[in-house]
Image: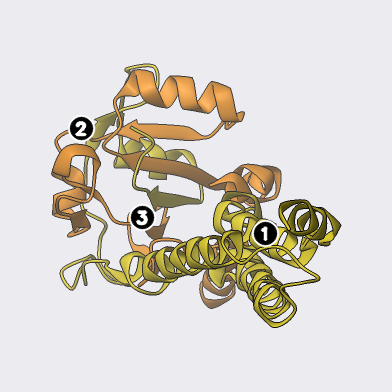
Chain colours: A orange, B yellow
Amino acid sequence: MRSFQQTLPELESRGIQVVAISVDAPDINRRQRQKLGYIYTFLSDPKAEVIRRYDLLHRSAGPKGTDIARPAEFLIDSSGTIRWVNLTENIAIRARPEQVLEAFERGEQATPQ
Amino acid sequence: MLIASMSAGAKKSWNWSLWIGFLFALTGFFSYTFFAQFPITRDFPWANLLLFATGGILLVLGLFRAFGKPRVYRGKILGPILAILGIFMFGFFSYVFFYVLWQVPPSTGAPRVGQKAPEFTLSDQDGKDVSLRDLTSRSKAVALIFYRGFW
């Protein structure tokens, strides 16, 4: 997530908006954003409804056995269509911004505007 | 006799290799949060395993010294204790890294490439409602990052 903050200017210059989603409450997100210096949007899904809809629920993996999101990354174009998905098999291995940029460039080449 | 053994004890050399080895193992155990900042040492814990390996070699060397040359080096009691602690730390680290972190649900029902992303509306960090439609209409693309949370 830090790497997405570091690459944010480059991502935004191509028109890519970065949005993070977790079960954390808005005030936790606000604090964490300030503390870590992240400026992209953090969305809060405390009941894991959206996480469930995307089939990304990791049961009992949170504190006190609560359900949380497993790490996953999507690139969605302006029509709402998914252009790229990354479902890691290891919690510690997350997508890198370069992968998102690469997927975005591929999409741009395939559909010139 | 007592004086002789005491003076012999005092003359024994510090078994540095035990302590430095243990220090390496300890660093290997606790330094992942630091190495997680860099993709190479995050995706596979090369740095931590190297620290553990160095620590292991030094601890074995220290044990050989303590038990092989007990008149020269100290560490017959401390050596095995530090070595066992080192083994436990390595075992726990390996368990987390090579088992626990791989326990991720398969998410076979997750939306796929080419499909429409399921619509949603959620609160942002300021409590303001944001929908996926808002996000996609505002930009060329949206990188949606689901993460475990800080709690």
The answer to whether tags 3 and 2 share a subunit is yes
**Percent coordinates x, y for residue A10 in the rendering:** 70, 50
Residue, disc 2: A46
Q: Is residue B101 left or right of residue A64?
A: right
Residue at mark 1: B38
Residue contact between numbered discs 2 and 1, judged by CB atoms under 8 Å: no
Tell me whether the residue at label 3 lies in contact with that at label 2, contact meaning CB atoms closer than 8 angstroms: no
Which residue is painted at 56% across and 62% down in the image? Answer: B77
Residue at (44% x, 71% y) in the render: B94
Name the side, left or right, on which B82 lies relative to B24.
Answer: left
B100 and B5: which is toward the camera: B5
* Mark 3 → mark 1, Cα distance in angstroms: 34 Å
Instruction: State the CA–CA distance, disc 2 to disc 1.
Output: 30 Å
Tag 3 and tag 1 share a subunit = no
Mark 1 lies on a secondary structure that is loop
Q: Is residue A53 left or right of residue A22?
A: left
- Determine if residue B7 is in view: yes
Q: Residues within 10 Å of mark 1 (few under 14, many from 20)?
A: few
